[in-house]
């Protein structure tokens, strides 16, 4: 695979990740910062049934509609993502856009009185940029009367291909880091293993769901399989049970302190 093909593949994947996590980021803005446990992805499983409404119905679609923020770091990440992708779309449109003004595929520039395509929010900007990255709609098009019209967009020049790749990966990294989904390993704060009191480690990665391991090793009696390093490991499907066990252990400790 050539470097340009790699840049297209990685850039497109980064843009899709940003789109998929955008609703989570917007919801994070209204949630005060918290410890990284439990993982944010578990919040929907652990939320009471009365509040179990679809994410798309609870999250505002664009940042400007959001209420007063409770998490300024999340707000900063959202503003950074919007600004970076909106500005990138402007740059690409100026270089390769040939679509007529009435073409819905056209990226509309903002003016002093009109936000242009920015009014549609980050999701549309990410979709539009991905189309340019993948050189979509770059061939002449046949009309109903059989005539050919010029392609709506020119192929993306190489220098803009790599700039698009850079911006997309930077935005993805910022969003994943804010949501705690970047690749990292961290202790589960003040929560020892309910079965052996060993240290629990939370492992996150943008390519797979979070998991937790116990640092004690094979002597831990937790009812989950071992990982490749001989540690008890709670994969994604087992994490809700671990949360329940940890909460029960904390309640027992509180009762003991109160006695």
Image (spheres, rainbow, N blue to C red):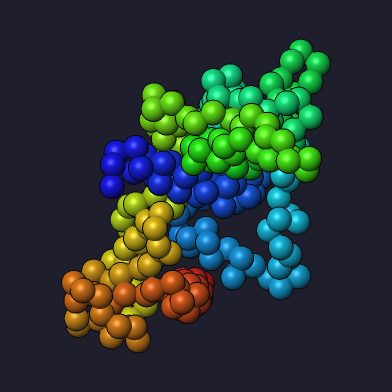
Q: Nearer the viewer, residue 133 or 227?
A: 133
Image location (x, y in percent) of residue 40: 52, 58
Q: How many marks?
A: 0
Query: Relative to residue 102, is residue 37 drawn left or right?
Result: left
Image location (x, y in percent) of residue 77: 53, 35
Q: Is residue 121 visible?
A: no
Image location (x, y in percent) of residue 221: 28, 85
Residue beneath the point at 81% across and 16% down: 113
In the displayed structure, would residue 256 be above or below residue 33? below
Residue beneath the point at 50% across and 49% down: 17
Q: Nearer the viewer, residue 173 or 235?
A: 173
Image location (x, y in percent) of residue 202: 36, 61
Query: Relative to residue 161, is residue 110 drawn left or right?
Result: right
Residue extending furthest front?
Answer: 146
In the displayed structure, would residue 226 be above or below residue 62? below
Asked where in the image residue 137 lies, by quadrant, the reply is top right
Asked where in the image residue 97 lies, by quadrant, the reply is top right
Residue beneath the point at 76% across and 25% down: 101
């Amino acid at each position: 695979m050539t470097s340009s093909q790699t840049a297209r593949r990685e850039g497109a994947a980064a843009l899709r990740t940003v789109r998929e996590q955008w609703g989570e980021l917007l919801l994070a803005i209204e949630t005060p910062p918290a410890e990284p446990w439990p993982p944010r992805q578990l919040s929907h499983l652990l939320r009471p049934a009365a509040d179990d409404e679809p994410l798309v119905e609870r999250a505002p679609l664009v940042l400007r509609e959001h209420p007063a923020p409770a998490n300024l770091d999340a707000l900063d990440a959202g503003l950074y993502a919007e600004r970076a992708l909106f500005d990138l779309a402007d740059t690409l449109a100026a270089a390769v856009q040939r679509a007529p003004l009435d073409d819905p595929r056209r990226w509309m520039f903002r003016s002093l009185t009109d936000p242009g395509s920015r009014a549609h929010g980050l999701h549309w900007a990410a979709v539009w940029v991905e189309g340019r990255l993948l050189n979509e709609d770059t061939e002449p098009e046949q009309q109903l009367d059989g005539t050919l019209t010029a392609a709506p967009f020119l192929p993306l020049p190489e220098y803009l291909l790599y700039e698009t790749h850079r911006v997309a990966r930077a935005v993805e990294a910022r969003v994943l880091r804010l949501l705690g989904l970047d690749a990292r390993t961290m202790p589960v704060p003040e929560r020892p293993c309910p079965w052996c009191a060993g240290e629990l480690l939370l492992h996150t990665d943008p390519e797979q769901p979070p998991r937790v391991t116990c640092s004690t090793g094979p002597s831990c009696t937790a009812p989950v399989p071992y990982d490749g390093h001989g540690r008890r490991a709670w994969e994604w499907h087992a994490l809700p049970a671990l949360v329940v066990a940890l909460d029960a252990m904390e309640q027992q400790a509180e009762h003991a302190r109160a006695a």
